[in-house]
Amino acid sequence: MARSVAVVGTGQTRHVSRRDDVNMAEMVREAALLALQDTGLGPGDVDAVVVGSAPEIFEGVNSPENWVGPAVGAAGKPMLRIHTGGTAGASAAIAAYYHVASGLFDTVLAVAYEKLSDGSAQYGLSTCCDPLWDRDFACGAPALVALQAREYMARYHPEITEEHGAMVAVKNRKNALLNPCAQLRMELTVQDVMDSAPVASPLKVLDCCPTSDGAAALVIASGSRARKLAARPAWITGVGTCTESPYVPDVDLAYPESCVRAAQHAYQMAWVYEPLKELDVAEVYEAFSFQELIWYETLGFCKPGQGGRLVESGITKLDGEFPVNPSGGVLSSNPIGASAMIRQLEAARQVMGKAGDHQVGGVRRALAHSWGGAIQFSTVTIFSNEP
Amino acid sequence: MLEVAGGSEEPVEVVEGDLDIEYRYAYGEYYDRFYREMRDNRRIMGVACARCRCVLLPPRPYCGFCYEPVDRWVELADEGTVQTFTNVQLPFPGQPTEPPYIYAFIMLDGAAVQFPHLLGEVDPARARVGMRVKAVWAENRKGTLHDIKYFRPVENEG
């Protein structure tokens, strides 16, 4: 039986379109020091470091852990770099969780980052595809997710409309107004989103995430350490990850199995039977508006095809019964390698009572989700106020 | 090569970098046969999984659903049904096609997984999921997916 494990400290930078005042390693150090300060620890006090980062081609720096790891205190300690596309940040924290749950380490620092202004995000994303197959058609992330959104809308026609996607964009960007770290903080209307410039139909500019510079860090500790280091640790009670085929068409884009399975595994571990009733808040990886509707369904918040109705009902608004993305989500900030860890950080803070102006009242259990690769990796992490 | 941006009196804030690398990718046995058939015979070949009773693209030595080894080749129609599509409006760095263009996943008749390609000769406003389309082959074929120029609507469509 694995040991109980908790997040005891969290840190993140502001997420902005460009940071020229710091280099990549300094930016990651900024988040790491904030997370360590949150626990009263110094870089020397952790037993191991896990670095999460997205494809090296984004910044054009190979083996970035050579540079980033020592900047956050990894010298003289075990260090691993974890890379699983968009889920890299969450996978890094989950790897830190494995370290501690195994009993081999007591306190582990996980960091994740992206400095997208250093290079070309969309060029980098296209080169993630099989060069022998679909690379020449894979226009970064937007075209792939546009295909996903169209398939989803067609399957449940006429239940899901472009306006439902727009509602997600309006909701999350409004939540971001309360998050000082978010990049796009906007009061919008559904019409604003509908009227914004077309990117790849049905996606318009305001359905899409920005590209960001930013970093996040989590200090993860064993049960006995956690009780000493934090007044209200966020206990990691459920973890699920799953992988699917790299050939996009093999994946059911409108209902990705990897997400369903990751959720089932995490729910089983955390004893969650009715997610909408038993969870209090969720942070999901909606790089594009329509994805939040799809994740409502694959995470079991509603039945397949009901995502539009769920967002329409207002339940997932900040003042609703089950807020989704109170931080503003990925639609408001997307430092790609960090975004999945930011979902975990925000969910953990909700449980710790440290979410600031976008804190939801009385949170006992929070969910963090992420997707990555060619919509082929999924992670789900559940945080609770007790082990 | 690193170049310092700005003159000597300016603070050194940003350096410009550039990576210029050429790659050559081996096709391997399955892609090799697939692309030879496209180039020489205008044929789209999939591999059939005996256990799942389905035909897979791209051809590969294992079934993506059940992991069984797969070695039986099956010819697929160069005609199929649009499963999903997007009208791409913006240029994406590294992509060879000039926007606007329609990128689609097409379920070829007889296949179990979709084929990624472009739609052509179609009014974007009339493109729809479920549309029947047929491959338009390139005259000059080199053994890549561009051996098909695009898929066009079959008669009574588009």
Image (cartoon, coloured by chain):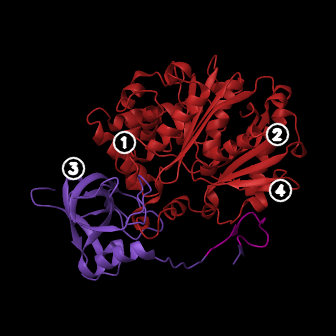
Q: Which chain is purple?
A: B
- The image shows residue A85 at horizontal and vertical percentages of 57, 53
Chain assignment, label 3: B
* Residue where numbered disc 2 is placed: A107
Q: Residue at x 81, y 27 (%)?
A: A230
Cα–Cα span, label 4 and label 3:
54 Å
Task: Tell me where the magenta segment starts and ends, as one range.
Answer: B4-19
Q: Are marks 2 and 1 on the same chain?
A: yes
Residue B9 part of the magenta-drawn span: yes
Distance from Cα at disc 2 to Cα at disc 4? 17 Å
Q: What residue is pinned by disc 4? A: A70
Q: Which residue is mark 1?
A: A195
Residue B96's place in the image compared with A383, above or below, is: below
Question: Based on the displayed image, in which of its 4 quarters is residue A97 positioned?
Answer: top right
Q: Residue at x 43, y 60 (%)?
A: A139
Inspect the image, locate mark 4, and give the three-letter code of the amino acid beneath it: Pro
The mark closer to the camera, 4 or 1, is 4
Say which of marks 2 and 1 sits in front.
2
Which residue is identified by label 3? B130
- Magenta segment's dominant SS is loop
Percent across and percent down for residue A220 are 76, 37
Along the polypeptide, which appears first: circle 2 or circle 4?
4
Q: SS at mark 2? A: strand
